Image: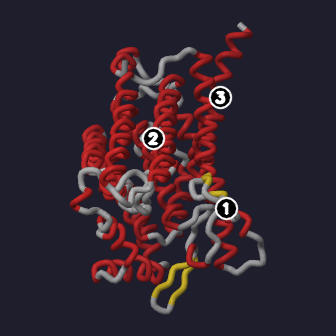
Amino acid sequence: MKNDKVRSRAPIIYTSFIYMMFNIAFILGDWKVGPISFSDIIVILSIIFLGFYFLDQKINVLPFWYFIIAIFFLIYILINIIANIFLNQTFDLIAAAISFIKLSIYLIYLILFCSFVKSTRSYNQLLTIAMYTSVIVMLIGFYIYLVLTLKLPLPYEFFWTFGRQDENSYTYYSIGTILIRARSIFNEPAHYGFYLNILMTTLLFSRFQPNKSIMALLYLSLVLTLSYSSYAIFMMVILLYNIKRFNLGRLFTDVRIYGLLLVVLGFIYFFWDMIEHVIVDRTKSITSGADDSSSSRLAGSWDYIHLDTLFTGNGIGNAPEIFNIYAYYLTDLGLIAFIAYTVFTFLLLYYNPYVGIIFIMLNFQKGGYLAAMYWLFVTLFILMVMEYRFKGTFSEEASVEEEQLLQ
């Protein structure tokens, strides 16, 4: 009995460790020492620990077709590299080789991590650790925001030792107005908003009961980013979540709905100046074409695509970091990779339309398919959709019949 208890407790400790590393890798997505990313180091270490787990437990990983897809993807990229060597005179083979190695590592991690969640049926534990880990990130964000806003003589720069420290990374300039923007330990408020929106989506659209106080902190943190793209996704998440839970009868009988409406109206009234600068003025700037940031996301991301390289692309790692991931795939890897990623998006939409819509919007917020943070985001959304599709196969609620569907 004693040995059985040890075996039953050990996975809990191990899963907590693996999930903590996952969240730390996500949070430190912007931290670098020279060209080396903290997230990449953590992902590599996680692969080693996950490998030891599967060797020790002798547990089969995800269905064979996951590996087939990954292998075909990597073979396509190798063929793409060879094609660009002969067809593209400006092709940088060293950059392509480094990018290929990174992409291979990310795919291995995605498969092993999803396999780990499935084999331990601990998806809810992953969300719990993600939720409580985010509290630390948000409290740091509040601390830095208050220090900068109130000009308090307190240290904060050490949080940004491995990232940006320039004033432009945390200030919002409008007509006659300078506002402080929350960015916590990320390089930009938009990156912080990207993290918070992914977390919010995962907590709200999974079979999970998030802590209401933590969710309130999350909403406030998103507001303080003053990030237009984060606001758009934030509002879409809330809209889709309420559509999903909509009950016409509650609209007229639930007092909480009227209370929430009063809170929203009060917020608009007291913070109208901020709303006017961040949303109203920014919207006018976007519609007039004067906003460079939004233009680069919506139209500028396609500028590196040329008809003569439409099929092969410029080669993996040979384009600058592009905000729009769809344009990034087309620019770097060509038409086939773009179509494959579009098909993947439609599969997410088919299995869970709400999550699929949010996935599409997040692909326009932060570029970089060759960064660990992007693949951690994709991993979370795959887990979320599969958990929804197979009704608990990644948590303890799964039935034998549902388990067989994935074999």
Q: Residue furthest left?
A: 307
- Which residue matches tag 3? 14
Q: Are marks 2 and 1 in contact (CB under 8 Å)?
A: no
Helix, strand or loop at disc 3? helix
Q: Crowding near pointer 2: few (<14 within 10 Å), some, many (20+)?
A: some
Q: Residue at x 51, y 44 (%)?
A: 102
Q: Crowding near pointer 1: few (<14 within 10 Å), some, many (20+)?
A: some
- Which residue matches tag 2? 379
The image position of residue 152, as x and y in percent, is 74, 78
Relative depth, front residue between 148 and 286: 286
Relative depth, front residue between 83 and 242: 83
- Which residue matches tag 1? 162
* Type of amino acid under label 1: Phe
The image position of residue 388, as x and y in percent, is 36, 34
- In three-dimensional space, the C-alpha distance between marks 3 and 2, rounded to whole angstroms, equals 19 Å
* Type of amino acid under label 3: Tyr
- In three-dimensional space, the C-alpha distance between marks 2 and 1, rounded to whole angstroms, equals 25 Å
